[in-house]
Image (cartoon, grey):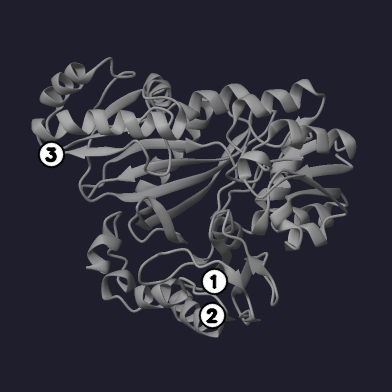
Amino acid sequence: MFSKILIANRGEIAVRIIAACREMGIKTVAVHSTADRECLHVALADQSICIGPASSGASYLNVSAVIAAAETTHAEAIHPGYGFLAENAHFAEIVRDCGMVFIGPKPESIRTMGNKSEARRTMAAFDVPILPGSDGPLENREAALALAGEIGYPVILKASSGGGGRGMRLAWHEGELVSAYDAAGSEAENAFGDATLYLEKYVERPRHIEFQILADGAGRVVHLGERECSVQRRHQKLIEESPSAALSPELREAMGRAAIAATKAARYVNAGTVEFLLAEDGSFSFMEMNTRIQVEHPVTEIVTGVDLVKEQIRIAAGEPMSIPKRRKIRASGHAFEFRVNAEDPETFVPSPGLIEELILPGGPGVRIDTHIYAGYRVPPYYDSLLAKVLVYGADREEAMIRSRRALQMFKIKGIKTSIPLQLRILDDPDFQAGKIDTHFMERFLK
């Protein structure tokens, strides 16, 4: 097992990794920008080192600075968390070449799953359900038009190297596809340095279902059930829950088998997430695989009792996962995650600034993952996530009641947050009934 791990991240996920390392008796090194000197992960780690100015490009995304920090502090492994360098295959290769361990999958798996058109092709070869669409990258606009005419509208263009909804355009007819092709390619080039696109049949009101998987170096692959992430705005998730109200035991079994098949197809080792679109008719199709720990991983931890970050570390150290082979992983109860962001709940404009007062909720069934405290100044340079309010109940109804109580007891003064929006969603009849899909927020905000 490792004696020291460097955490190449910031904020709540860095604090979460430190907590896991503390329990395992592993020393931690926190890296930080000049803007994050007062961030909680810096205070909690055993060592800390500044790696650059406020700009993430000059600090948290600066591969040379991160590697130098790890070598200087004699860290044996690097945990990338999520975001920043977490899905950067080149970074994972450099970590390996420098004699350290990247706590995540192999660079080859990151590269395969990071290219969405290549991921589609890989899944198809292993009989994982995929939507009708291009077999690989589109050569030009004419190829897109020909394929769309074959599979039928509506269709959606996606960036091969994409994520977060960038480089994505919907077309309901040929005229829209002509203009969407250039717009999507241009946005993909600006965002990812790669204008390559692929095309899929568009599912009009899908639910977003993802399966948490673990795979160790001995070849064992398990899934830990699903999370539903359908409540999202502009492809950014707001609320996650487990289990999904839409899955029957039979459908859950089928999707779980497909998630394991996808993991094996990618020759994947460590923790990951296989994401599916679930259509109204009950059919499902592979969307993508996230080759890292997810923001919403605690939802699965709560209903299964499995510490996913500890499992990541064990697997990276060459140990088998700690889940007994004969144990069937069973989810119990119901869990929600509410993302508390520093933003205006009406306009969604970011709201950085000084947190003057802070009262965090507690009580039965409530867990808070955060890096903030009274007197902390939220910087304007990074993602607006402040905290994750995680709530557990014996069933969905109890979890919703506890969620409302927890969000009402979360008091923060000095900045605006998304909590009022989350409370409004909890009062929505469709949300309460589990009648959600990826367009829920569009209807809700209208």
- For badge 2, the amino acid type reads Ala
Left or right placement of residue 90 versus residue 285 in this view? right
Q: For the residue labelled by badge 2, is the local secondary structure a helix, a strand or a loop? A: helix
* Numbered circle sitting on residue 391: 1
Q: Is 58 above or below relative to 328?
A: above
Q: Quadrant of the N terminus?
A: top right
- For badge 3, the amino acid type reads Trp
Residues at marks 1 and 3, CA–CA distance in whole angstroms? 39 Å
Q: Quadrant of the C terminus?
A: bottom left
Q: Is 364 above or below relative to 21?
A: below
CB contact under 8 Å: marks 1 and 2: yes
Find residue 302 and report its image quarter.
bottom right
* Numbered circle sitting on residue 172: 3
Can residue 296 be seen here? Answer: yes
Q: Residue furthest front?
A: 53
- Which residue is label 2 attached to? 406
Q: Which of the two residues, 9 or 406, is positioned nearer the viewer here?
A: 9
Residues at marks 1 and 2, CA–CA distance in whole angstroms? 8 Å
Q: For the residue labelled by badge 3, is the local secondary structure a helix, a strand or a loop? A: loop
**Residue ID at (41%, 32%):** 190
**Residue ID at (57%, 59%):** 380
**Residue ID at (33%, 44%):** 277
- Lower sequence index among marks 3 and 2: 3
- Lower sequence index among marks 1 and 2: 1
Q: Residue furthest top?
A: 139
- Lower sequence index among marks 1 and 3: 3
Find residue 220 and report its image quarter.
top right
Q: Which of the two residues, 339 or 405, is positioned nearer the viewer here?
A: 339
Residues at marks 3 and 2, CA–CA distance in whole angstroms? 42 Å
